[in-house]
Image (cartoon, rainbow, N blue to C red):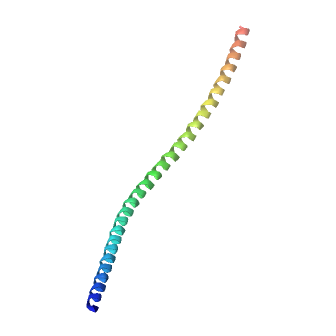
Amino acid sequence: MESSNRKVMKEMHDDSFELLEEKVLSAVRRIQDLKTENEALAVQRDELARQVEALNDRANRAESELADARSQAAQVDRMEDKRKLIEEKVGGLLDKLDSIA
């Protein structure tokens, strides 16, 4: 009977080790899968960071171009106001010349 008990205990022990080994191997595979996934995500993150940087550069250039365009538009408006003023003065002077003649 003692031999039988030892045999049962040994089988239970062996089963426990096999179960533990299965769990450890499964955990190792999962860790490897997660490492692979992590590496892929790091590559994606780096690519997205480059895209964000490029978009920020484009946005900054666009803002700068917009500010330049607004400045030029304001300058054109000032020049147009001056042109109208000159036109009015020239028209007034021509009217005076016409009245003299």
Q: Residue furthest top?
A: 101
Quadrant in the rendering for residue 36: bottom left
Quadrant in the rendering for residue 80: top right
Q: Residue furthest front?
A: 1
The structure residue drawn at horizontal position 26% and vertical position 86%, both measured from the top left corner, is 7
Q: Is residue 85 left or right of residue 71?
A: right
Q: Nearer the viewer, residue 3 or 97?
A: 3
What is the tally of numbered marks visible in this picture?
0
Q: Is residue 94 above or below residue 23?
A: above
Q: Nearer the viewer, residue 34 or 49?
A: 34
Q: Residue furthest bottom?
A: 2
Q: Nearer the viewer, residue 65 or 79?
A: 65
Quadrant where the N terminus is found in the figure? bottom left
Q: Is residue 6 left or right of residue 75?
A: left
Q: Is residue 10 above or below residue 69?
A: below
Residue 64 percent coordinates (x, y) = 54, 44
Residue 82 percent coordinates (x, y) = 66, 27
Quadrant in the rendering for residue 92: top right
Q: Nearer the viewer, residue 72 or 67?
A: 67
Q: Is residue 48 left or right of residue 97?
A: left
The structure residue drawn at horizontal position 36% and vertical position 69%, both measured from the top left corner, is 31
Residue 83 percent coordinates (x, y) = 63, 25
Q: Is residue 25 above or below residue 57?
A: below
Quadrant where the C terminus is found in the figure? top right
The structure residue drawn at horizontal position 29% and vertical position 88%, both measured from the top left corner, is 5
The structure residue drawn at horizontal position 59% and vertical position 33%, both measured from the top left corner, is 73
Q: Is residue 80 above or below residue 96?
A: below
Residue 46 percent coordinates (x, y) = 42, 58
